[in-house]
Image (tube, rainbow, N blue to C red):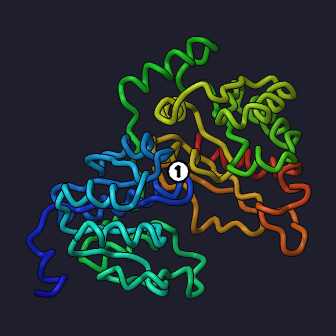
Amino acid sequence: ESSSARWMNNDRALLYCAGGGIGDSMLASIVARALRERYTDVDALTLPGHRSALERVPDIDRVMVDEGEERDVATRIADERYDACVVTWATPRTARIPQMANIPVRVGQARRLYSYRFTNRVVVRSETGDVTSHWTDILLDYSRVIGCNTRDHRPRFVPTAQDEDEAKAVRLKHGLAAREYIVLHPANAIASERGNWPVAGWAALARALAGRFGTRVAVTGSPNDAEIVAAVCAASGAIDLSGATGIGGFGALAKDARAFVGITTGTMHVAAAAGAPAVGIFPFQSDYPERWAPLGERTGVVRASYPCHPGDTKERCVDYACIAHLNLPHILAAVAALIA
């Protein structure tokens, strides 16, 4: 019996998205929505740090964590008796575990040494020169190969009642009324690692947002971003909310904000998925706004305008001059368009 014949009458599927950042898993959640066209139950297997985010995605029934020995994970997954598994972040580990778990239909990336472990192999369009398709559309190629698709590519993030209470407590502490503040997120994953992230550009943006829209600005970040956020707030008078909430509380804060403004990172995708008017800032010439734009009811992007050094990427830039010289008029115009 062929794999295509086996999956026709089955009803349990697994989305295996264990790699990258939270934004990668949020965008991969679109695959879970597509799988629901054919499968009654759709679970996710993800990295420990991504679990909280995916637990708030209504397209996913249950979230499990990929940690520990491969054999132990495979045994746990085998007990669930999934009929299909879609792997959106392919590695030797994520290819081996579904095979070891004897999942009959296994969809994953082609052109890798371990790709033979997948029963259905997909050539990722970005490897063939596609830089304009949104990443959700590229990921949906994995589910399309087994007949599952969705027209709605917008991820969904629904804060829990506890998340709402957490956000409300933070708002009360700082005197922030719903719809009367802007959330500013100035740091991405490498900001605190490099130690040379300019804060003057973000401080200038915080002051400009407050002045242009007559509202308070709350600056968010992870505990690792605390030093950066504190510096931005000290120079701008904005409210320091770094580490003030978990990812669910952040989603609730963003949802109730007048707008979210931030550098392209996972929190941008969470804010947009939660329903916030979201402006994503793509400061690097090596960014791909078409591929990574936030998706939601009201979203916008601000593209790179500062000339990078030849060959610069966000991982190895020497001075992050584009951050120090953010294009404030373009950002303010994008926020004004969403608020209007």
Q: Quarter-wise, where is residue 231 in the image?
A: top right
At which x and y percent is residue 96?
A: 38, 71
Q: Residue at x 81, y 32 (%)?
A: 232
Q: Is residue 197 above or below residue 112?
A: above
Is residue 146 rendered to the left or right of residue 313?
A: left
Q: Residues within 10 Å of mark 1 (few under 14, many from 20)?
A: many
Of 275 and 190, which appears nearest the observer? Answer: 190
At which x and y percent is residue 41?
A: 19, 55
Q: Residue at x 11, y 68 (%)?
A: 10
Q: Residue at x 19, y 55 (%)?
A: 80
SS state under label 1 = helix
At which x and y percent is residue 151?
A: 33, 66
Q: Is residue 242 above or below residue 141?
A: above
Q: Amino acid at mark 1?
A: Ile
Of 130 and 32, which appears nearest the observer? Answer: 32
Q: Residue at x 63, y 48 (%)?
A: 279
Is residue 322 rendered to the left or right of residue 42?
A: right
At which x and y percent is residue 99?
A: 30, 72
Q: Is residue 64 above or below residue 1?
A: above
Of 165 and 1, which appears nearest the observer? Answer: 1
Q: Is residue 258 above or below residue 164?
A: below
Q: How many marks?
A: 1
For label 1, the residue is 22
Of 76 and 318, which appears nearest the observer? Answer: 76
Q: Quarter-wise, where is residue 39 in the image?
A: bottom left
Picture quarter with the C terminus: top right
Is residue 206 rendered to the left or right of residue 45?
A: right
Picture quarter with the N terminus: bottom left
